[in-house]
Amino acid sequence: MTQKLLAGSFQLMKSLNRSLILNTIRTEGPISRAEIAKLTKLTPPTVSNIVKELIDSDIVIESNQGESRGGRKPTMLVINGKNFFVIGIEVSPASIYSVITNLNAKIIDSVSIDIHHPITNESLLSFLSKSVKQLLDKNNWINREHILGIGVAMHGIVDIENGISIYAPGLKLRNIPIKEHLESEFNLTVKVDNDANSMALGEAWFGHGYDIGDFVCVNVGQGIGAGIIINGKLLHGNEFLSGEIGHMTIDIDGPKCSCGNYGCLEALAAGPYLAERAKKQLAMGEKSMLIHMTGHNLDKLTGELIYEAASQGDPFSINVLKETGKYLGIGLSNLIHTINPSCIIMGGGVTKSGHILLDSLKETIKQRGLTEQAKSTQVMLTKLGDQAAVIGAVCLVLVELFFTQSPQTSII
Ligand SMILES: [Zn+2]
């Protein structure tokens, strides 16, 4: 059914040899037809035929003339990245953020819709449609044939094969058929994955993960999740649960988590829980400028306010961040000893927490690492900042375009 729904231009480009040639032009371009044949080991007539189709569909263009090794100068080929577009959507518990980008993931326009709780599957799907429609209406100069697809970065657990959000804890929703809904509504190919996975993909294509085969992207915000890339491939696991490090137990006597267990990493270090922990300590009589900052209403306490107070030197807030960094460091040490990534890229609200939390996190990894290499695992902040998940959503479609779906194929 999906194949029938795909837009014409996308359908044309999506075949093993076409993807191979397209990706060779993307990574090696400007490149000649002869060079493509050499690199892909396809015959020159096959390359010529496919390149002709790609030029006809406008996704590949001839650029300047290359160097000649005697004889006629070869015509060089490049991807027409500025003339094709992808829609990326990030669905967080509070909002739907959508962008339209070109093939270089440059954001051309964006739309943000707030989500009001409680919400149903149907109303979430209609909000998704609404955000795509708004983007298309605002950018009606874009040829619809040149929009290659929609990528959705969804928090929670996602069945990536069927594009179903199996469980979105922040919305308290289950089994949302995102792919089916958007494909039938817009006649575009739709890919859905978890937000941390999308973030990792975004960093792999356009951020710090570029050219790194093994790394982990950790999203710390309202919840905690990780996108794990091993040998250039996203790890999804048997039933799409890989990377759910937020529910790794750190303290069996710790606070109760949204999942029902006690002492999960998320329940100790994610934004809302961090505020909850601080609130309890303040209620016990601890002194802090947070009391003044919240107007003596501790229900207004947020992770952001704690970051702010810490940056102004509030000893209580500094201590809360140090403690949180330690919990995260313990979680990441467990991850290092399980996956052994070459680096860890941090994304989400935690990136705004400043050096106090990160220094404490790195110190904990240093204390706990089993080997010198483990101790010195690089930890850095995402290069794509607040856009990491939505750019990652765009990359879900780029992967479809530039790579065949062989399980052996690396996606970066
Ligand atoms: Zn949990």
Image (cartoon, grey):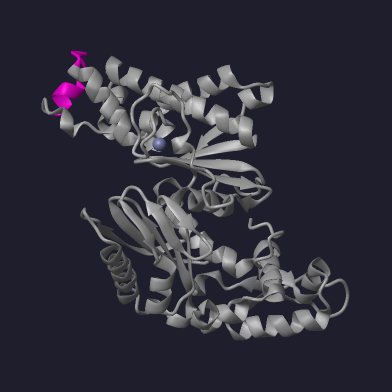
Q: Taking 175 as reference, is 10 above or below it?
A: below
Q: Taking 87 as reference, is 254 above or below it?
A: above
In this orientation, does residue 36 appear?
A: yes
Residue furthest right in the image: 70
Please tell me whether residue 291 belongs to the stretch shown in magenta.
yes
> At which x and y percent is residue 404?
66, 68
Say which quarter of the image contains residue 266: top left
- Relative side of 7 to 125, left or right: right
At 79% from the left edge and 77% from the top edge, which residue is drawn?
Answer: 73
Q: Taking 356 as reference, is 378 above or below it?
A: below
Say which quarter of the image contains residue 71: bottom right
> At which x and y percent is residue 368?
58, 19
Say which quarter of the image contains residue 63: bottom right
At 68% from the left edge and 85% from the top edge, which residue is drawn?
Answer: 52
Could you tell me which quadrant the C terminus lies in? bottom right
- Relative side of 286 to 326, left or right: left
What is the magenta range? 284-294
> At which x and y percent is residue 1?
51, 80
- Count how many numbered circles sit on residues in the image: 0
At 34% from the left edge and 79% from the top edge, which residue is drawn?
Answer: 140
Q: Taking 225 as reference, is 362 above or below it?
A: above
> At which x and y percent is residue 267?
36, 32
Q: Nearer the viewer, residue 283 or 297?
A: 283
Please tell me whether residue 330 belongs to the stretch shown in magenta.
no
Where does ligand 1 appear, by image quarter?
A: top left
- Relative side of 357 to 134, left or right: right
Please identify the dominant SS of the magenta region. Answer: loop
In this orientation, does residue 313 appear?
A: no
